[in-house]
Image (cartoon, rainbow, N blue to C red):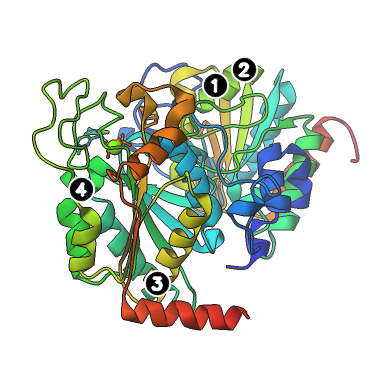
Amino acid sequence: MKKNIFQISPSFYDVMPAEYRELVENGPFEKKVGVSDLGAFKELSEEHPLCAGCGLALSLRLILASLPNPEDTIIVGSTGCSAIAFPQVAVQNIHSLFGNQNAIASGVKRALTLRFPDKIKDVVVIAGDGATVDIGLDMVMQSWFRQERITTIMLDNEAYANTGGQESGMSQEGAVLHMAPKGKTFPKVSLPELARASGCVYVAAVNPAKPKKLEKAIVRGVLAARELGPTYIQVFTPCPTNYKFKPNETIEKIKMRVKEGTYETTEFISAEAQELFARLEEGKK
Amino acid sequence: MLSTEYRVLRGPEGYLPPAAASMGVVLPEKGSALVEGCIVPKEDAMELIADKLLSAKNPFFFPGPLVLWAWKDGVVEKAKAIKEMAEAAEAKIIPMPDYRPKYPMINPAIEINPNHPNLTIWHNKIDVCVFIGVHCHYANMALKIIRGGTECYTIALCGEAGHEDAMISLRDVRVEDLKRMTQIIMEKKGVGK
Ligand SMILES: Cc1ncc(C[n+]2csc(CCOP(=O)(O)OP(=O)(O)O)c2C)c(N)n1
Ligand code: SF4
Ligand SMILES: [Mg+2]
């Protein structure tokens, strides 16, 4: 896709809302911008209605800024808090029925590959932990087994946040939520390990307290999915509303959990992905 | 004149009006147009469009993505012709740049969204509107919502097969048709004969 597809018809330039004009003039399309350039370009998300201090909102902002080719990216989302932010996102995105996101993404990727054989189209799933590890786990793992060339990003707030706080497979053992008053009785699922065992060529667990690391994981995840096979990135996105902490404590919570060893940041790079990244790094020099 | 029982008339028709197609309204053949559910010659519909626009208190054009964005050859010229027609009719323009059902809200003073077009119509007190360059399925949905909840008179200048859910709809609208309508409007205003 060439950037000129984003040009506004001159006759209507004056009536276009400012956000669109800014996207055309100063958006990240076909530019090499990233997380460290935030503030210097028009971002891909507008005002959204997520709660103050929402770890998921912050992470989504960073993820969007990290996409290597936003103009050629299609995001597949699922029901949950992030779905409420997506209508304000200036990247093609599809809202899928809760849990179906990886099946939809597989179809979208295959269709785009057939339709545009000479173009690169990145298909990226962005969904909650409930959608990914519980209700959609079948679709998620089957897409990995089939080696679909898609990136799966989980926004892990350790709860079904949008429905008022039920425990998910990603909640910690003992977690007490509005609708899990007795505390969760089994441990947090280790999806990164399952991803690796299921054929993902690149796996990372990151968080928005380390934005540059998050960015690197997203770029690697998208590029490896483009060339090799499925990739999985898990982003820790604490939810102040359901876990009842102050909105300004989100980053502190993340740091604390990492420090106490209850939320590991990890990275697995398969041999073929290692080779790919080395090649790409070499090409940059 | 082909007629059906059901008429596509100025609303408010009430919550969830039926799709006009489901009530027996059919699309016009090439060279014809639709007026309130009935098939008429294209030229008659063009005259009527000019009358509706000129007698309106507050007419607006709602250009959609197909003409707002210069995405293929010919669009820039079409956009220019639309602007000229709106200017001749002394209508204002509010764009529909995309179809996202924007939360938490849109700004109805400067944009229209197909998922709640009534907000823009109410906010600006629009009594006649013209859809152009909106993909057909979104146009039909928005036209139905407008008919259901507002008193606005709807006109669809469609580049394809036309819209049953608009009160007046042309089909296969090209730059020449827009220029022709601008000319009709100017003539009716007594200018540039
Ligand atoms: C098929 C289906 N089942 C259940 C729901 C109800 N539902 C809506 S949001 C949600 C929870 C989402 O949890 P998660 O994926 O973790 O996203 P979060 O809101 O925490 O970001 C559920 C169960 C639904 N919308 N559709
Ligand atoms: S409920 Fe939690 S995850 Fe959802 S928007 Fe609010 S803070 Fe974010
Ligand atoms: Mg969740």
Q: Earlier in the sequence, mark 3 or mark 4?
A: 4
In the rendered structure, the answer to whether residue A223 lies left or right of residue A231 reads: right
Q: Which chain does tag 4 point to?
A: A
Whether label 2 touches label 1, CB < 8 Å: yes
Q: Which residue is mark 3?
A: A224
Q: Which chain does tag 1 point to?
A: B
Q: Is mark 2 within 8 Å of ligand 2?
A: no
Q: Where on the image, by quarter, is ligand 3?
A: top left
Q: Residues within 10 Å of mark 3 (few under 14, many from 20)?
A: many
Q: Amino acid at mark 1?
A: Leu
Whether label 4 touches label 2, CB < 8 Å: no
Dot 2: element: helix
| Cα–Cα span, label 3 and label 4 | 22 Å
Dot 1: element: helix
Q: Which residue is mark 1?
A: B119
Q: Which residue is mark 4?
A: A133
In the rendered structure, the answer to whether residue B77 lies left or right of residue B98 reads: right
The reply to the same-chain question for discs 2 and 1 is: yes
Disc number lying in front (4 or 2): 4
